Image: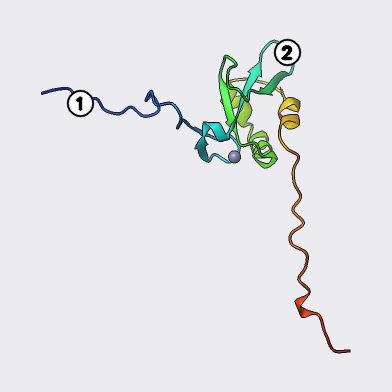
Amino acid sequence: MTDAIAPGEGTAGTVGSVVRTCIGCRERAEATTLVRLVAVRGTTPVAVVPDPRRTMPGRGAHLHPDPRCLERARQRKAFGRALRVEGPLDLDAVVAFLPPATNHPGPPSPDRNRSTRS
Ligand SMILES: [Zn+2]
């Protein structure tokens, strides 16, 4: 009998389809579609900075490049939990990195009920 090698979960050496969980909306997505965030220690408050190249050492958190996910992560204090940081965090760099929140005003009201009679 040969030992069957069970495919490990999350520890497979396959590169290219790494799935991470967005700390904002908790949805799983490919790591390449998420922004990696790392905490820069030694500052007060601890600064959280984006790591788009994913080359910075340390523990990383992943977030959709979406201000709404950032807001949700902030509200649930997911940064501190994901990055193992206690106390206040400086998220200015992350806010600056993400695109500004878009206020979708919605489609212009269709004028289909316009009265043509006068
Ligand atoms: Zn998200």
Quarter of the image holding residue 98? top right
Where residue 101 appears, x then y in whole percent?
74, 43
Residue 104 relative to residue 76: left or right: right
What residue is rendered at 71% in x and 23% in y?
88
Residue at the extreme left of the image, as rendered: 1
For disc 1, does the CB lie below 8 Å from ligand 1?
Answer: no
What residue is rendered at 24% in x and 25% in y?
5
Q: Which kind of residue does numbered mark 2 sit on?
A: Thr
Tell me whether circle 2 and circle 1 mark residues in contact (CB < 8 Å).
Answer: no
- Name the mark on residue 43: 2
Instruction: Read off the residue under disc 1.
Output: 4
Residue at the extreme top of the image, as rendered: 42
Please tell me which of labels 2 and 1 falls first in the chain.
1
Taking the image as four quarters, which one is ligand 1 found in? top right
Determine the secondary structure under disc 2.
loop
Residue 8 relative to residue 41: left or right: left
Where residue 29 appears, x then y in whole percent?
51, 38
Determine the secondary structure under disc 1.
loop
